[in-house]
Image: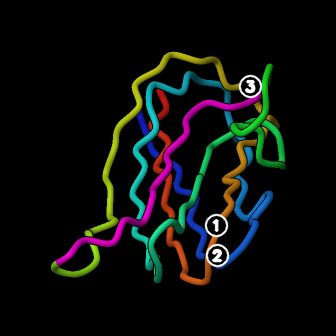
Amino acid sequence: MSYCRTLKVQFAASADAAAEITCLRPGRIKGIQFVTKADLDADGENYTVEVSKKPYLQSETNDSDGVLCVQAGYGYLLTSGFGDNGRNVYCPMDIPWATGEKLYLNGVLTGTGGVTAIAIVHIV
């Protein structure tokens, strides 16, 4: 039987372990769907969000061992106005998930805007 678990966070700066879920029964993570929307107020603002087995952002370091999925966005100023910065991405995978093991939604924003990130974890 397959089911989904959801992590959601809104942040305006660093957001380590902003949301977490704990495995209630053993299974396999078959994919993570990322939905993000960002209010990036100026040219050059950017964000990174990740689902990880660690409670802190790892995707911006070498040799990280807990990251499952990463999504990033960058603000760019167009001559006709600011560009759209919403995304919906699915990351397929096949990873065991043991009872009691946690997943974390971590993120960082460079700038003065805000980010809403939702990660839907698909489990069998």
Instruction: Name above or below for residue 120 compared with residue 81.
Output: above
Q: Earlier in the sequence, mark 1 or mark 3?
A: 3
* Callout 3–callout 2 Cβ contact below 8 Å: no
The residue drawn where x is 37% and y is 65% is 76
Amino acid type at image mark 1? Leu
| Between 98 and 69, the one nearer to me in the picture | 69
Amino acid type at image mark 3? Ala
Q: Which residue has dot 2 on it?
A: 11
Q: CA distance from mark 1 to mark 3?
A: 31 Å
* Scheme by which the image is coloured: rainbow
First to last magenta residue range: 66-79
* Callout 2–callout 1 Cβ contact below 8 Å: yes
The residue drawn where x is 70% and y is 54% is 106
Dot 3 lies on which element?
loop
The residue drawn where x is 45% and y is 55% is 73
The label nearer to you, 1 versus 3, is 1
Q: Which residue has dot 1 on it?
A: 109
Crowding at mark 2 (Cα within 10 Å: few <14, some 14-19, many 20+): some
Q: Main secondary structure of the magenta part?
A: strand
| Between 20 and 51, the one nearer to me in the picture | 51
- Is residue 97 located in the magenta-colored stretch of the structure? no
Q: Earlier in the sequence, mark 2 or mark 1?
A: 2
Q: In the picture provided, is 102 more to the left or to the right than 29?
A: right
Q: CA distance from mark 2 to mark 1?
A: 8 Å
